[in-house]
């Protein structure tokens, strides 16, 4: 019968070192994964910034208190809405902290507008309050589109406007004012009818008198 060998102190130290290395590698991989996941939301290499920004957006959403209930109520609970908020932030694909903050404002305005519309549809809600909630929701919805336009301008996708304050044309030069398109082909010239090109003859009162036959007294009588 073979006896099991006892582990030497060197073998124990090697095993302990390997366990520490594996634990360190696992922790580093988890941290790298967390940075990658949160950077897609906050656009920053700082996990603290991305986490804080996500928490601020989550604070603007309304969460129904359905800790217990049916399966549908549980699905529509806090965890599902938190995941939806993260997906909404990730959809903007922020490349830096500024774009992430603009995206956060847009998502917060979306939550606010939808909450206003939801409260306006409550059966017991007074008519004047429902009207005010609808107006507030519409204003927040327009604010969200403004945030989208600001994000496009930040990324250089918005309309480029060039404003000319002063223009000096030297002798012999020409200036074109208007919307000039590069490479545009001028439309073909359509020949006008000859009747439009011809000038109308001048007509005077004397000429009309000469052309009109004036009957002479006694003329044409038998």
Image: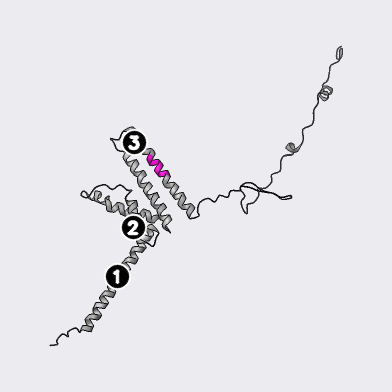
Mark 2 lies on residue: 51
Mark 3 lies on residue: 130
Magenta span: 136-142
| Mark linked to residue 26 | 1
Which scheme is used to colour this image of the protein? one colour
Callout 3: few (<14), some (14-19), or many (20+) C-alpha neighbours within 10 Å? many
Image position of 38 with respect to 109: above or below: below
Query: Could you say which is closer to the camera, residue 190 or residue 10?
Result: 10
Measuring from the top left, give residue 96's x and y in whole percent.
43, 58
Q: Which residue is drawn at 43% across and 55% down?
A: 99
Magenta-colored stretch includes residue 138 = yes
Q: Can residue 142 be seen in this view?
A: yes
Q: Which of marks 2 and 3 is in front?
A: 2
Q: Considering the numbered disc 1 on the image, is that residue within a helix, a strand or a loop?
A: helix
Tell me the quarter of the image containing the N terminus. bottom left
Q: Can residue 86 be seen in this view?
A: no
Q: Which residue is drawn at 27% across and 72% down?
A: 23
Distance Cα–Cα, label 2 vs label 3: 35 Å
52 sits to left or right of 205: left
Q: Which residue lies furthest to the bottom in this view?
A: 1
Q: Which of marks 2 and 1 is in front?
A: 2
């Amino acid at each position: 019968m073979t006896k099991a060998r006892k582990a030497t102190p060197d073998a124990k130290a090697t095993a302990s070192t390997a366990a520490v290395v594996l634990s360190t590698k696992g922790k580093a991989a988890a941290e790298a994964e967390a940075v990658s996941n949160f950077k897609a939301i906050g656009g920053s290499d700082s996990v603290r910034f991305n986490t804080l920004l996500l928490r601020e957006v989550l604070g603007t959403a309304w969460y129904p208190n359905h800790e217990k209930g049916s399966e549908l109520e549980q699905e529509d609970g806090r965890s599902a809405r938190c995941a939806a908020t993260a997906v909404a932030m990730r959809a903007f694909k922020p490349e830096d902290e500024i774009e992430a903050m603009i995206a956060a404002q847009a998502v917060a305005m979306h939550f606010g507008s939808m909450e206003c519309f939801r409260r306006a549809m409550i059966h017991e809600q007074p008519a004047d309050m429902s009207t005010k909630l609808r107006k507030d929701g519409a204003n927040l919805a327009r604010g969200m589109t403004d945030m989208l336009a600001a994000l496009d301008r930040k990324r250089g996708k918005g309309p480029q406007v060039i404003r000319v304050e002063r223009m000096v044309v030297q002798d012999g030069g020409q200036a074109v004012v208007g919307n000039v398109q590069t490479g545009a082909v001028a439309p073909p010239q359509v020949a006008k009818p000859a009747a439009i090109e011809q000038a109308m003859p001048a007509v005077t009162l004397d000429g009309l008198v000469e052309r009109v036959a004036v009957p002479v007294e006694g003329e044409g009588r038998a």
